[in-house]
Structure formats: C-alpha cells, structure tokens
Amino acid sequence: PEEALRKITLENNQSTSEGIRNVLLVDTHGHPHLNRDIQYSNHFSDEAKKELNIKSTIQQGVVSLTCAVSPLDWDSALQYASQSSWILPALGVHPWYLGDILSNTTTITNGTDPPENATDAVDIKKYLNWEWLDTLETHLAQHPHLLVGEIGLCKMAKFVREFPSEKGGKTTALQLQKRVFRKQLELAAKWSRPVSVHCVNMHGSFMEVLRDVLRDVLSDAKRSAEASGGMKGGDDAAYRCALRRAFPPAIAMHSFTGTAHHAKEILEFEKELLHPESVDDGGRKRRKPKLQTKGMEPQSDERNAEVDEVIFYFGFSHVINHLMCTSEKARRKGMEAVRSIPSNRLLIESDVHAQEDVALGTAGALAFVAQVREEPIEKLSDDCVKNGLKFLDSVGLQLFDQQKQ
C-alpha cells in the first residue's frame, strides 16, 4: 500500500501541475465514519507521512464512499460525509445486522415445539420492524447524493447462524435476508441510486433475486400486452424502459469473492437486462446459434470489451481479497476472478473503518489488483478512477466530468 500510494501521488502531483488531473483515487467502499480499528496508517512511518502529506491526501485527493451498515449508524455516516463534497454517504442494512431491525413482539405458535416448517406458520416478514425502510426512503428524498449500501446476502452472518430455531432457524434467517435485500434494491431503483452489494457464499440466491425482479417486470408487461390487444412487451420501448428502471443504475459487487464463472453469469444477466429481446416470456434466456469461429482470430480482448452501458461493477479490497484470503484454493480462484473482470468494470475499495486508512487501504487494493492482472499501476489507477467516478455518476458528481473521459 505504501509504495503504491507513493507512486500514484508522485504522478498525480506532476499531472496536477499541468492542470490535467485532480483525483488521486476513488474508494468505492469503506466505513471510515465508524472511526475505529486503524489498520494501515499505524504502520506508516512519520517520515513517509510527511513526504506524502498523508492528511492532505485523505482530505483532498481521494473521492470516497462511506457505507453505513444499520439504522444505528446512518446519522453518523451522513454527518461524516457532510465534511466534504469528496465524501459520499451510502445507507442500508447489511446482512450481518438484521438483528438491529428485528421485531420483539412476534411469536410463531402457542405450543412449545416449532412446526416442521416454521416459515409456514406465520408470514416471516412480521419478524422484522419495517419502519427503517420508510426512514431510508426519507433520507433518499432529502439527500440527492445518497447511495444505498451496504446491502446484500451472507450465509456466514452471525444473524443466520444464531437465528432462533423456534422461528425457523437458518432457513428463515436466509429468507429474511433476501426480503430485506430486495426491498432495498427496489428502493435504490425507485430513486435511481447506485448500490454497494455484499454477497458471500450466496451467489445463487443473489441471482434468484435478480431474476425474480426480471420475471415480475415480464409478467406485468405480459398483462399489459393482453389488455392492449397483444402488444409484445419484449419489442416495446415502454417495456424496455420499465425493465431498466426496475434495477438500480449501477450495482457494485463489494470486495467480490465470487469466481470468474460467477462474474460471467452476472454479466450475462446484464446482457439480458439491456437486451430484453433475448429473454422469453418465462424470463429464460433464448439460445443463440453458435458462430463458427474455428480458424478465426479474436476481434478484441474480452477483458477489455466495452459496452454501451455498464450496470455491474466489481470491487476488490486489499483487506478482504488479499489479507483475509488465506487458503491456496481461495487465493487461486480469487485471482482468476480478478483477471476475468473487464477493465471498464473494475473498482478498488479500502473497506476500512477509519479516515486515516482510506488512502492507504485504497492504494493497497490498487496494488493488489495491478499485481494480479500484471498491469502497470499507473494505468490501472487511471482506469479505476474513471470507473469509480462513473459508478458514482448517477448522484451528480459533475465536479469530476473531466476525469471520466
């Protein structure tokens, strides 16, 4: 992290003197508003701090996103972000913290033993207090630069492991996660805000949620078509618009721990979303005839392929994707995933919990991704700045239009 920050700081200082560049890094996921657990800057020498003017770098050189995890820290995230236009807030309910929105009044049965299928005994949404959802929407209405996050799905969450067996145990806990995730995804779509998504060992459930949304839009279109005399929704401009608006403008997979195959599946879904003519009335992808490619040279590097619109981005952090990735198998699959991501979808994240660590944590992510992809750190830095600003663009970051080009 230190060497990466030193290198891009030097380049940034030279470029800034020429009036070309002003953003050093874009950190698209962290929790610095929590102000705890300093990890990087404590290992940074005083001499190095003075050399790089690290305080100025944090305050003036890094565009950052601070993500709340529960209604309990929403106010602190908003307050932290208010100190600078270079800091954006995101509010949401993290899958680890569903315990903070539990209802204390719901019971399943009057007996002592839970039913065989506890989720059949009561509508499980009653286990949660849903007032937070109205509060979140109020914040979105009041703060035009507010994102939604950190939200998502996590099989490893303590909430899942310890959810009471009399209320359905793990099965109910995972269903609650999916409901909370979808509600927040829908709210982000309604207000056209990007989202930051945590997804750990739940790729299948994540794709189920996306396809459920797609199928609901298809069903609505089919009903409208029948009511209007058989208009084909897949070919209708209004249908295409409704389909796109059913999803947030941009979705960042935070500290992506999926495989290259998972990333490919997500990007295939994006193609279906942007090109609904490839999906049949049941929400299934239409098969396309295979092209004869034997003996033909590839037209471009798929990893660098550009598309008209980017919805899904993939973020990587030094702390999650490198430091906490300890097994050889996990490291190998993780590096394969990093290499598979198209360059125009890469994001870097600090995922830190203190402001002092934002620049170093983000630089560490940059160094990790550059090493894995065997790319010059300066070029990757430029790509990730552009990608990060584009990801945040739908909340109106017009100050940085020059660097998004």
Image (cartoon, rainbow, N blue to C red):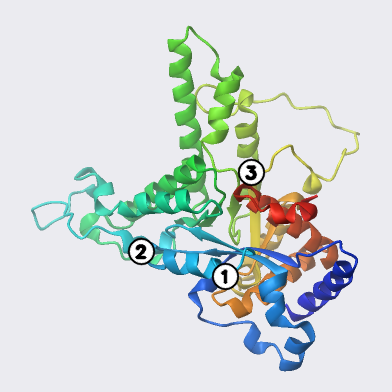
Q: Earlier in the sequence, mark 3 or mark 2?
A: 2
Q: Which residue is mark 1?
A: 83
Give the residue at x 73% y 67%. Answer: 366
Q: Earlier in the sequence, mark 3 or mark 1?
A: 1
Which label sits on residue 311?
3
Which residue sits at x=76%, y=92%? 47
The residue where tag 2 is placed is 159
The answer to whether residue 214 is left or right of residue 278 is left
The amino acid on which the numbered mark 3 sits, given as a three-letter code, is: Ile
**Alpha-carbon distance for marks 3 and 2?**
30 Å
The secondary element bearing badge 2 is classed as helix
Q: Amino acid at mark 2?
A: Phe
Q: In the rendered image of this protein, does residue 324 appear above or below residue 65?
A: below
Q: Is residue 132 above or below residue 220?
A: below
Q: Residue at x 45, y 64 (%)?
A: 69
- Could you tell me if residue 286 is visible in this image? no
Q: Residues within 10 Å of mark 3 (few under 14, many from 20)?
A: some
Task: Nearest to the eye among marks 2 and 1: give it.
Answer: 1
